Image (tube, grey):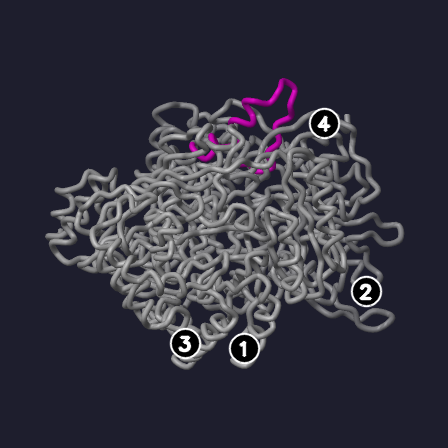
Amino acid sequence: MTDLEAELRGAVRGEVGFDVMARALTTMDASNYRRVPLGVVAPRDADDVAAVLAVCRERGVPVVARGGGTSIAGQATGTGVVLDFTRHMNRLLAVDPEARTAVVQPGLVLDRLQEAAAPHGLRFGPDPSTHSRCTLGGMIGNNSCGSHSVAWGTTADSVRELDVVTARGERLRLGREWAGAPQGLRALVEGELARLRTGYPELPRRISGYALDALLPEKGADVARSFCGSEGTLGVLTEAVVRLVEAPRARALAVLGYADESAAAEAAAGLLPYRPLTVEGMAADLVPAASAGLPRGGAWLFVEAGGESAGEVRARAEAIVRAADVLDSLIVTDPAGQRALWRIREDASGTATRMPDGTEAWPGWEDCAVPPARLGAYLREFRGLLTSHGLRGTPYGHFGDGCIHVRIDFDLLTGAGVARFRLFSEELAELVVAHGGSLSGEHGDGQARAELLPKMYGPELVTLFERAKAVWDPDDLLNPGMLVRPAPLDGNLRFSVLPREPVDVAFGYPADGGDFSAAVRRCVGVAKCRTTSAGTSVMCPSFRATGAEEHSTRGRARLLHEMLAGEVITNGWRSTEVRDALDLCLSCKGCRSDCPVEVDMATYKAEFLHHHYAGRRRPAAHYSMGWLPLWLRWVTRTRTAGLVNALASVGPAAALAKRLGGIAPERQLPRIAPETFSRWWRRRTVEQARWMPAEWKEWGGPAEARPTAEGDGDFPPVVALWPDTFTEHFAPEVGQAALRVLEAAGLMVMQPPRIKWKAGVEQTRDGEAWGYSENPLTFRRARVCCGLTYLSTGQLDRARTVLRRTLDLLAPFLDPRLGESVPAFVVLEPSCAAALRTDLPELLHDDPRAARLAASVVTFAEALERYAPDWTPPALDRPVTGQTHCHQHAVLGDAPDRRLREAAGLTGELTGGCCGLAGNFGFEKGHFEVSAACAEERLLPAVREAPEGTVVLADGFSCRTQLEQLAGVRARHLAEVLAEGLD
């Protein structure tokens, strides 16, 4: 323990972390920059803050205040001690509806304030797209704005009073009329009144520099307002009194379509007289292809109208449409429809980090602003500047305020690319200033733009900024290198520490050019994974259960980044810090869909475990549950399911088995079915089992002569029903039900082969024909398997072996000469279907059969919709509850399931989130508490609150097991419910 760490531990009541994990988690924010801190302190109150400042001042150690870590200019990173306010100083202290104020601590997440104010018809005006994870302290430090700033202004407009501790330990309460001003500040301002009155551009989104003009007497000498946007360089905020505004009772969203973003920008300023709540712009490049329903155009303005009634807001929206010169328009009054559109806009900060061709794009010039009337002209020149430097970017943002967000495909990995980044930044700063703009219009200057402030303000005003900093912080203790005497904009780049050559890995990472470093770079720190409510999404259940940064997708990505860098985490793949952080990753794959940049932490976890345990003994759970298909096959072969179940029901035997297998003692061992699904099927359809191989051999002629998955002539559509491990050994009733329903829908259902065949060419009367025959040299029975349990435990060599065996077994169906005649493989277990769809082609990226099989995998609902479109399911007319499987949500999609439920009269929505069992995760020792917490978030409350007679749906075996063990509820697969309706 260092002397500094020991002294801090003795001085504060909050946590002090100088360990590798604490430091590695705070090296970066959401910017391009990286600085390694000495340690992290989570203060419990203002006394702790003052104590930290006293210790660090004595030792000359810098202090950086940090909230949600979503800053885009680098101001939430530092080389000294980082203060993390999100752990303890995160409370809402009071709401006064009559005064329309709230008292908050700096670590309070904005959405928590909005939730508390909503019952009073109030809200906090500024609402950045990161509202679900950004903190009030960070918003005050950056003077954040958000999409509603045309109506309610910036955070500075919403601040009444601030409690601050200065670097020298003075406690001040900042307000108007010089309240709380440190000694010397008033004299400084009164000596520079003329410069302060003329040196600042007039525009709504001027965030750059210190707001010293707020101290002018005609502006009320508002010290609290002047403090906003100071990026933690003047004092440390410990409490704030903020102003609330009245929330509109009704809203309507007018979506206006234009040819391009310049046309949209030209029109934005003309809509301001209609007093809209928002005037947001974005181009088609940032809109997912699946997002239907937008009006025609290449760019759109999202203009929101508010009022007292639905009729009033529709009339306002219609007036806005009439005033706008548009290609097409749409008015959305449905709240759900509005939320769906706003999600597209809010995700743009992550979506924009990838160009349409998949190449990377970065912040750096994320939010400069110009007067709204100049926005169209500015954008045209901005585009020209991009082209002259060979760069690309897609502007979007707050068009009504003249504030543009854009991420640009800078090359920040090579010296030449970094030099071009600097030159472009200097020229763009000059362009912004030429249009009367501000280098920052929302996110602050930080390290990204502070070096260029003389271009905007001139050297005299920048010198005044330095003098103001010296009044507040004469020792330059607080966040040095930001705003004044800044670090170079091309220094401390977070990519410079990553390896230049691709890392040797098992997965193919096709979306990242096979480069694991590029996959890890996907995380840009927008921290959508740090939301505390699942909503309709899944990501990130472990963070919501623990609230710890290392259990968020972002935190784990940061640790992997530092592992590759090798500076803080020095033992590479053997890192215990990375292992421990990944231990609570449920491999739910929620981040693959819910993260705006599609970080796939489940894959990264499997990759890490593969390397971490290479040549070493693994945890017992990896053998007991990772090898589950193998153990279950031995039970089947020896016909000992009854014996195993009997032993599992005996307390001492079950306890011993769980202890040896690394299984949580709180868990009950699932019962193995006395007869497997495949054995039941063979017993039921002996004739069909004999007929299919023979007929397939006879169909050895041209592809057009064979039956296809869509049906051909007298043949019905053919599908193969995949006997996944869970359906096969634990829940054969699900497979039996699915078989009944598929056959009732008119499909020919076959089993995947269990014998490896060889290809050959034979002579026929009409010439040569290829076909497959049994190979007597390799004749042995085997089973198809998705390899899920090996993948989730990182046993990738074994997973490859299992998957290649599966491809060999299915070779007759995957031969490219079949053309479109490949049957669909219906997979009932969503996690197995997801493994075949995504993990298989990414792990066996060198085998073309893998992609062919992945493309042939369909879910139960997809099979019925695609191959039996005219079939009408039984009318069940019952309410349902439950949870969409996390892999279904993240990889497979649930739209066909929704349509099938609707057709069957199954009403109600399934919840988001994750059940918490997640395959082997919830069974592993040490995971039970987190597993149960995940289930308690959405699933268990939904089931408990459902009215009597409600059908509990859960397509995943893990979900059904979790419900049975934690709630005593038997949930069913959709196939079971439909099969019951057939009777």
The residue under the point 44% across, 56% down is 604
Q: What's under tag 2, amino acid-wise?
A: Gly
Which circle marks residue 385 in the picture? 1
Q: Mark 1 and mark 3 in contact (Cβ < 8 Å)?
A: no
The residue under the point 80% across, 64% down is 703
Q: Position of residue 567 (x, y in %)?
A: 27, 64
Q: Which residue is mark 4?
A: 980
Q: Position of residue 645 (x, y in %)?
A: 47, 28
The mark that comes first in sequence, 4 or 2, is 2
The CA span between labels 2 and 3 is 64 Å
Q: Which residue is mark 2?
A: 701
* Residue 950 located within the stretch drawn in magenta: yes
679 up-or-down from 590: above or below:
above
| Left-right relation of 734 to 522 | right
Please tell me whether mark 3 sits on a helix, a strand or a loop. Answer: helix
* Nearer to me, 237 or 886: 237
The mark that comes first in sequence, 2 or 3, is 3
Please tell me whether mark 1 sits on a helix, a strand or a loop. Answer: helix
| Left-right relation of 49 to 652 | left
Which circle marks residue 422 in the picture? 3
* Nearer to me, 559 or 775: 559
Q: Which residues are magenta?
A: 933-957
Q: What's under tag 4, amino acid-wise?
A: Glu
The mark that comes first in sequence, 3 or 1, is 1
